Amino acid sequence: MMLRETNIEKLSAEVFDVLVLGGGINGAVSAASLSRKGASVAMIDKDDFAGHTSSNSSNLAWGGIKYLENNEFLLVNKLCKSRNHLMRSYPSTVQEIRFLTTLQVGFRFPAWFVFMGTILYWVMGRFLTQRPTFMSSQKIKNAEPVINVSNAQGGFEYSDAFLHDNDARFVFNFVRSAMDNGAIVSNYVEAKGSERIDGIWHTKALDKESGKEFTIQSKSIINACGPLVDKYNDDIQQETEHCHLFSKGVHLIVNKLTKEEKVLAFFASDGRLFFVIPMGQRTCIGTTDNQVENPETSVTEDDRDFILDNVNSLLDLDIPLTRDDIISERCGVRPLAVKDSGGEADWVQLSRKHAVDVNKEDKYLSIFGGKLTDCINVGEEIADLVEDIGIPLLYKDAIWYGESSDEIKKEFEYRAELLELDKMTPEYSSEKLTVRLWRRYDIHALQILDEIQRDPAQAEQLMRNAEYLRAEVHYAARREMITKLEDFLRRRSKIEMVLRKTEIIDTPGIIEACKILFGEQAEEKRKEYVDAVLKDYPDAPVAQAK
């Protein structure tokens, strides 16, 4: 908590080159890029970092194969290059995964024709991944017996990439990088309006934790508020060429359904892509794709029924899934950039391409649309545009993304081996501790080793099946600006995705985690989380402090 309090004091203490509004993927890469290139940067988010759209994706970094159907070849080419760049820059995090795709009889194209599209996609991907293979229905069944091939015409297997940890963790690592390069950032600080006075932006800010109001001064503003970009622009009367339409996406997390670590891809009953995605000992299924008017949305019974009906139809399960099998849910809106046309657009034809509108006179930028795959391009583009509006970047060619060098990784692996770290891996873990800690923390994983070397008890798991060490919680308390318990459970980790909330509040480890994260405020923060869970599950048992 001290990191956040210190940063809030600093936010009102100077005139920044850039104020970034929003800590989702667009805001995070903007802050990371600009701070490394020499700008003084402030960034705030009214909730937690990656609190909405950026923590509710399919966890895929893909080249947009579905856009081939719309003949958007330039977009697919660009996204394939972006995916490849991510894979090379983050080899521990963004990794190749096979997509086993099954097409039903009566699908709008024959299987062989769609397969030819995967060949083109592979070529556009510069042959970085394994080549696609065509598969008969029987071959599909042999490869993954859980797939229902009774109405299948055949299919194929091709490659794309996925985020091995969750999307929110990926976003936060850009936030952490920005802080490492001097950016002053805070979550739960809301921008209440911005006014330009004598060439300087004055943004009224509210600390939602303390109720304190203060002013942040900056030479320029980047509106990276995701689905709320339009609302903030309207509030401060900034006119833009683009605006957003919203697509609601829902995923359900259930126990592991497949034997293979592959994404199972289908076309759902509405004709759109439907995925069964591996998530360690769990499986993520979805998604929906429905136009909504309001970016504030939630999972409905219709959403659950749509996903469950489709997965039960597409898979050959011994026992059909029901709502009782749902462990957790992911729900968010995809902000889709369109040129302002009164909200009229061909919904099916819309893609996730991003756009940046620039008011050069006011030094005000608005980022529309975008997706995780294209994040490095967004960061580079924003840096160029900020320099173009008159903000000097002393180190404009500096590289601001990517994992640390192989030498640092080897040093980590050497020290981990001396500690016999991998022998401490629980039997239920989906991977070795050395692999997991490097991917999550990069160079900062050395600090985790320091904790374990000092006290071997730091290598113990706080909650069974959560795959999180005591040392990681200590690190999060110091370095990751955990303000609410949900920040840790849902976004810095994926504990809330793989364990039911009712399990979490009844786990003794959560009491110790709160003490580590919040100190004297531990019981207050735990009660805040427990009370929210009990609203939905009033009869759920709750762990009691001894």
Image (cartoon, helix red, strand yellow):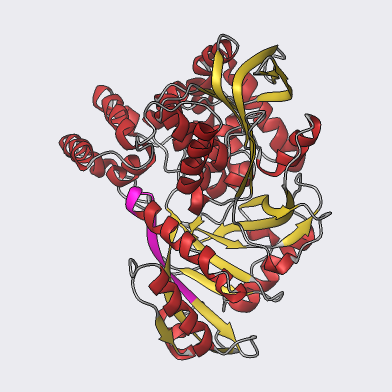
**Which residue corresponds to the image point at 52% horizontal and 83% vertical from the top-left?**
114
Hey, which quadrant is residue 543 in on the image?
top right
**Which residue corresponds to the image point at 45% horizontal and 46% vertical from the top-left?**
376
Question: Which is nearer the eye, 235 or 471?
Answer: 235
Q: Does the magenta stretch include residue 105?
A: no
Hey, which quadrant is residue 133 in on the image?
bottom left
The span shown in magenta is: 88-100
**Which residue corresponds to the image point at 56% horizontal and 48% vertical from the top-left?**
497
Position of residue 287 relative to residue 228, above or below, is: below
- Horizontal side of 104 relative to 164 (left or right) equals right
- Horizontal side of 14 relative to 97 (left or right) equals right
Image coordinates of residue 303 in percent, x first then y, are 74, 61
Position of residue 496 relative to residue 445, above or below, is: below
Res. 239 visible in picture: yes
Position of residue 8 relative to residue 102, above or below, is: above
Image coordinates of residue 22 in percent, x first then y, are 62, 34
